[in-house]
């Protein structure tokens, strides 16, 4: 009984390890790509596409590992592929959001527009009447 439990635990750890390698590689690539995007001065709107393009090989490897892992756990291929796509999008969203935030913070501030108070019109100025 204990041997069966230990074997199951070892099997689950081995399956999880099949995902951790590609996950670490993809996240590392995203960090490097975000740093490179700063030096390339990528606009905040284009950062997600930039990250996905820069890390396409690692992204593909991670998707394949996630699909395989989920299918081994009884998930249908279509659902596993959809779930893997959402997982990858989540991994991309974090550095993309951070990049956009920092780009907005570091963007040059526009000079405030000079506001002038319009002079009161004669109809708006009323003189108190004397009794």
Image (cartoon, rainbow, N blue to C red):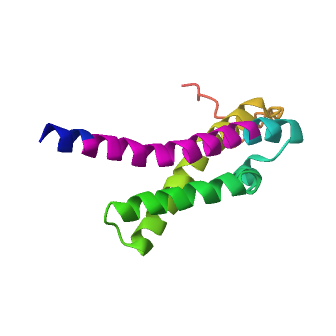
Question: In the rendering, at what x and y percent does residue 5 appear?
Answer: 19, 41
| Viewport quadrant of the N terminus | top left
Q: Is residue 26 magenta?
A: yes
Rendered residue at 49%/48% (across/down): 19
- In the picture, measured across the screen, residue 104 lies left or right of residue 89, that is right
Front-lying residue, 27 or 111: 27
The answer, for residue 120, to whether it is visible in the render is no
For the point 66% across and 38% down, the residue is: 28
Q: Which residues are magenta?
A: 7-32
Residue placed furthest toward the right? 40
Position of residue 57 in the picture relative to residue 38 (left or right): left
Q: Is residue 7 above or below residue 106?
A: below
Residue 77 location (% of width, % of height): 42, 72
Q: Nearer the viewer, residue 4 or 18?
A: 4
Answer yes or no: is residue 78 visible.
yes
Which image quadrant for residue 109? Answer: top right
Question: Main SS of the magenta segment?
Answer: helix
Quarter where residue 7 is shown: top left
Please name the residue shown 76% across and 53% down the image.
50
Q: Quadrant of the C terminus?
A: top right
The image shows a total of numbered marks equal to 0
**Percent x, y of residue 80:** 42, 66
What is the x, y in percent for residue 86? Answer: 49, 59
**Between residues 94 and 117, which one lies in front from this camera angle?**
94
The answer to whether 29 is drawn above or below residue 109 in the figure is below
**4 to the left or right of 75:** left
Q: In percent of the image, x 82 and y 38: which residue is there?
A: 36
Q: Is residue 23 left or right of residue 39?
A: left
């Amino acid at each position: 009984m204990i041997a069966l439990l230990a074997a199951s635990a070892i099997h689950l750890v081995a399956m999880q390890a099949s995902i951790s390698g590609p996950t670490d590689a993809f996240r590392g690539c995203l960090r490097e790509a975000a740093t490179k995007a700063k030096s390339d001065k990528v606009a905040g709107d284009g950062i997600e596409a930039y990250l996905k393009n820069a890390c396409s090989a690692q992204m593909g490897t991670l998707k394949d590992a996630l699909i395989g892992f989920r299918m081994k756990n009884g998930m249908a291929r279509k659902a596993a592929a959809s779930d893997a796509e959402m997982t990858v999008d989540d991994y991309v969203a974090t550095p993309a959001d951070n990049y956009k935030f920092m780009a907005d913070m570091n963007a040059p501030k526009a000079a405030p527009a000079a506001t002038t108070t319009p002079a009161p019109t004669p109809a708006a100025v009323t003189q108190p009447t004397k009794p």
